[in-house]
């Protein structure tokens, strides 16, 4: 398979990046669920939920800049844990 077909697969780069983006990851989870990828949908839902919670907490503490930092920090932490478990 080529780069683009792998990038857009259920475990591809695009799916793994978008599932960590606050709110956007919920759409990724929905697409995964409709496609029958229940395990990937659950993963996307969990990771997006954490980054969305981080962004919301960051916003409450530091406004828009806090939201960006909170979402990015949570997404980075989730990625590190994900890599360590692989």
Image: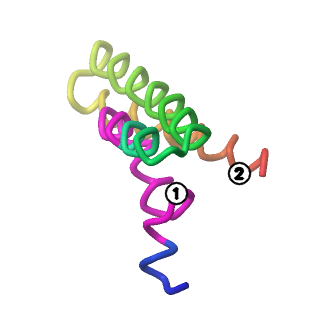
Instruction: Quadrant for residue 26, please give it.
Output: top left
Tag 2: Cα neighbours inside 10 Å, few (<14), some, or many (≥20)? Answer: few
Q: Residues within 10 Å of mark 1 (few under 14, many from 20)?
A: some
Q: In screen coordinates, is 3 left or right of 67?
A: right
Q: Is residue 84 above or below residue 42?
A: below
Is 4 placed above or below 81 here?
below
In the orientation shown, which residue stands out farthest toward the left?
64
Quadrant in the picture for the N terminus: bottom right
Residue furthest to the bottom: 2
SS of the residue under disc 1: loop
Residue 42 vs residue 56: left or right? right
Is 77 on the left or on the right of 18, as rendered?
A: right
Q: Is residue 18 magenta?
A: yes
Q: Residue at x 42, y 79 (%)?
A: 4
Which picture quadrant has residue 32?
Answer: top left
Q: First in sequence: mark 2 or mark 1?
A: 1
- Is 77 on the left-hand or right-hand side of 50? right
Q: Which residue is mark 1?
A: 10
Badges 2 and 1: C-beta atoms under 8 Å apart?
A: no
Q: Which residues are magenta?
A: 7-27
Residue highlighted by disc 2: 83
Q: Nearer the viewer, mark 2 or mark 1?
A: 1
- Residue 17 colored in magenta in the image: yes
Seen from the viewer's position, the closer of residues 74 and 22 is 22
Residue 53: x %, y % from top left: 41, 20
């Amino acid at each position: 398979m080529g780069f683009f077909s792998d990038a857009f697969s259920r475990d591809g780069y695009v799916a793994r990046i978008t599932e960590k983006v606050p709110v956007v990851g919920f759409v990724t989870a929905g697409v995964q669920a409709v496609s029958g990828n229940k395990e990937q949908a659950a993963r996307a839902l969990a990771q997006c939920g954490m980054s969305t919670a981080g962004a919301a907490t960051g916003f409450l503490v530091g406004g828009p800049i806090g939201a960006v930092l909170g979402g990015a920090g949570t997404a980075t932490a989730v990625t590190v844990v994900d890599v360590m478990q692989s």
